[in-house]
Amino acid sequence: MNEVYAEANAPLVVRETATGQPVGRVEVMTAGDVRATVNELRGWSAEWAGLSGRERVRWLFRYRDWLLDNESDLATVLQQETGKPWAE
């Protein structure tokens, strides 16, 4: 397993397990950043609750369509990050 250490305010570099080559970067968040993000997302829960079932289904289908449209890219990143074969 790769151990990852992030410096304060420096992005975390995600590396391909097999080669060690960079796959991407993830911004490191402080505890305050996480709290602010959680509070922002909680603010959207009232809007989601106000949607009808039909409207929620519409949004979920849009999300499904995005996942299907990006399936190959998502699978590539997951395979690079984990080092697992495509079949898994």
Image (cartoon, helix red, strand yellow):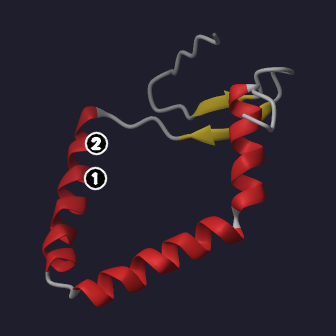
What residue is at 72 percent from the left and 34 percent from the top?
Answer: 88
The answer to whether 5 appears left or right of 23 in the picture is left
- Which quarter shows the N terminus? top right
What residue is at 57 percent from the left and 16 percent from the top?
Answer: 4
What residue is at 45 percent from the left and 35 percent from the top?
Answer: 28
Disc 1 residue crowd, few under 14, some 14–19, many 20+, Cα 10 Å:
few
Residue named by callout 1? 37
- Report how far apart the C-alphas of labels 2 and 1 lie in the structure: 5 Å
Disc 2 residue crowd, few under 14, some 14–19, many 20+, Cα 10 Å:
few
Residue 77 is situated, as x and y percent measured from the top left of the image, at 72, 43
* Label 2: which secondary element: helix
Residue named by callout 2? 34
The answer to whether 75 appears left or right of 55 in the picture is right
Kind of residue indicated by mark 2? Val
**Mark 2 vs 1: CB contact within 8 A:** yes
Residue 47's place in the image compared with 79, above or below, is below
